[in-house]
Image (cartoon, rainbow, N blue to C red):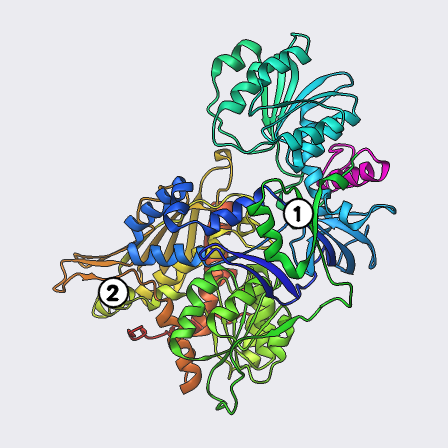
Amino acid sequence: MKQVLQHLRTGKLELAEVPCPAVRPGHLLVQTTHSLISPGSERMLVEFSRGSLLAKARSQPDRVKQVLDKIKTDGLLPTLETVFNRLDEPLPMGYCNVGRVIEVGKGVRDFNVGDLVASNGNHAEMVCVPSTLAAKIPEGVSGEAASFTVMGAIALQGTRLLQPTFGEKFTVVGLGLLGLMAVQFLRAQGCGVLAVDVDQGRCDMAAAMGCETVNAANGNPLRTAATYSDGHGMDGVLITASSSTDAIMQQAAEMCRKRGRIVLVGAVGLNLRRADFYEKELTFQVSCSYGPGRYDPEYEDRTRDYPRGFVRWTVARNFQAVLEAVKRGQLDVSELITRTMPHADAAAAYDAILNDRSVLGVVMEYPNGPPPIHRSIPGKVATRQNTAPSTPVVGMIGAGMFTKGVLLPAIQATGVQLASVASSGGLSSQHAGNKFGAEEMTTDTSSVLANPSINTVFITTRHNSHADLTIEALEAGKHVFVEKPLALDLEQLAMVTETHRAHPKQQLMVGFNRRFAPHAIKVRELLQSRSEPVAVNILVNAGEIPKDVWYHDPEIGGGRIIGEGCHFIDLAMFLVGHPISTVNAVMFGPNSGGVRDDKTSIGLTFADGSIGTIHYLANGSKSYPKETVTIFSEGRVLEIANWRRLNASGWNVPSMRQRMDKGHRAEVAEFLRRIEEGGDALIPYSELEIVTKASFAAVKAAVENITIRLDDLSPKESTPTSDWSDSQSPAPKATTS
């Protein structure tokens, strides 16, 4: 299928071939018939993309500060790699979509195949959208008119926040698409409207809708507002304009009556003058997009609707209200359509918006044919033939930022064949596949597992799918590299263990990369000669992740200790060289508010009497180093400083300084080499099992305030942890990458 993409780094706008997305539970798969280009936000995005790197930096000073902080902690080159990787990500354009439902996901009740719907889907021939961000189109409403639904909902939500009552008078500042629809909603509610813009043509359009108007380029909005309100002041102001100055907000405050209302839908300067708001007791509110539910993962991702009795106007119900207003003639968008163009001419459509400020609505029409539901598309690299059975041929399942920024470059550096990249949405697999030379890009995970030429699968999806995909891949006869965590609970882990036992010839690796870092290897080597237990202290300045991100969800991400803290449990066990015996942990108390498990201290004891402490904390500063590992041993101290420097006190060894290296490339290279050359697992499965159980134990210990013996946590069918000592992994050899 074809999809419009904007490349932030180069400024190129592309109509790209992308795999058709897979329908998800609670979602709809829609074949697009029309979509509307937003002349505001989409124009700004294209203009930003076409600016120089310096211009991009100047427009985002907060991001520049974050980059400078990262340079201080991680170094220049790793930071630049991260920045350019993010700029290299193509953005899907558009959010005003109309089309016909081709497939409904599990759990969808209110939609059927064949329904015409308006949604916030992109400018793509096929889109997968949440059922809570879609609405059926009534009979009599054309596809062109319905494409204004989402923009109309933004305008409608702003007017709702004004709380207009019949007979009140409001000012609407900015007569683009949002403003011209907002004045119609206010007029439909019996309100008088003063419409303000600097374009006389748009003022004339508002006048034809029954508004009083003033051209701010040559008129006086304050004087006009005073006259229009009979000297009492306007009841409220809706701002749908875009400006970097504070003048619009100041004028809005001045023209309001006492206790007037100001609602911001656009983007303007917000250096408010206190006296304006204090003396009149004005209220000011910023409207959030389409309405209640927007940006709420429960509503959008899990499609859990709000009860109508408590939240009358959600996103979807605002969509429905807009469509009904179009049907009844209360909202007329026919005069707002400047051009209608084929989707194939997307570049010309954007040029029209960029080069002609008089353009309002540009509607794109899509081919009226069979739905382009091809789930796989060929890459730019020809399929290789006659590969030896032991030669790794990789299929990548998951194509997020970490995969594209770390794992795929590591695979590419080995020269191994990348046969397929899969992702549920299609866009990320298309970008990753083209960038790293995949033979195929797909949204069909099962096709990767069924491909007989693929003998090695990397799994980098969301955490709740790791165990199931690992089991499926092993049963399909594939070697498996799965990013942490291996499982989210003991039941999942037991099933993985059982499957692994049944397929002993397959390599199974979890992405515990830090044990492959040069500094970790050197520390392990130095500790080999010790005769006493050691104390390992690991401080992780983890950084905060917003509480509504899936990582914190126990059913999807497992929380940050299971999802990421396992890295440091594995590192501690690797450095000590003996199995974990007990686990205890404490986290912030229940009265601390917010997420608690990302502020946790974990205590480990090991079979040889060593101890380990992991302070995993998300409440630190980004300018402070992210990871510090300190080992105390027999009157000596070793310190790994953020994987850039190894300091040795009391050791007759020089310090090691180098570019930050957390072991990712060495880990991938060693894993692929092990597949090609054969041999035991790179990390014995018993160690993977111990670390995974220890992460479960840490969460349980912190919640219940207890110390847990790891043997007591093991279900009967799991491999006994006592077997660990028989299969300790040797220190990996340092590799040059």
- On the picture, is 456 further left or further right than 260? left
Q: Residues within 10 Å of mark 1 (few under 14, many from 20)?
A: many
- On the picture, is 302 further left or further right than 84? right
Residues rendered magenta in the picture: 305-330
Q: Quadrant of the N terminus?
A: bottom right
- Name the kind of residue labelled 2 in the image: Val
Q: Residue at x 29, y 75 (%)?
A: 733
Image position of 389 with respect to 54: above or below = below
- Name the kind of residue labelled 1 in the image: Glu
Q: Residue at x 78, y 63 (%)?
A: 368
Residue 674: say if magenta: no
Return the disc, 2 or 1, that comes first in the chain's sequence. 1
Q: Residue at x 78, y 32 (%)?
A: 309
Q: Is there any visible trace of residue 259 in the rendered image?
A: no
Residue 330 is situated, as x and y percent measured from the top left of the image, at 81, 33
The CA span between labels 2 and 1 is 47 Å
Residue at numbered disc 1: 300
Any mark on residue 523, and which? 2
Residue 321: say if magenta: yes
Residue 237 is situated, as x and y percent measured from the top left of the image, at 63, 22
Q: Quadrant of the C terminus?
A: bottom left
**Mark 1: which secondary structure?**
helix
In which quadrant of the rendered view does residue 16 lie? bottom right
Residue 522 is situated, as x and y percent measured from the top left of the image, at 24, 67
Residue 727 is situated, as x and y percent measured from the top left of the image, at 39, 76
In the foreground, 693 or 279: 279
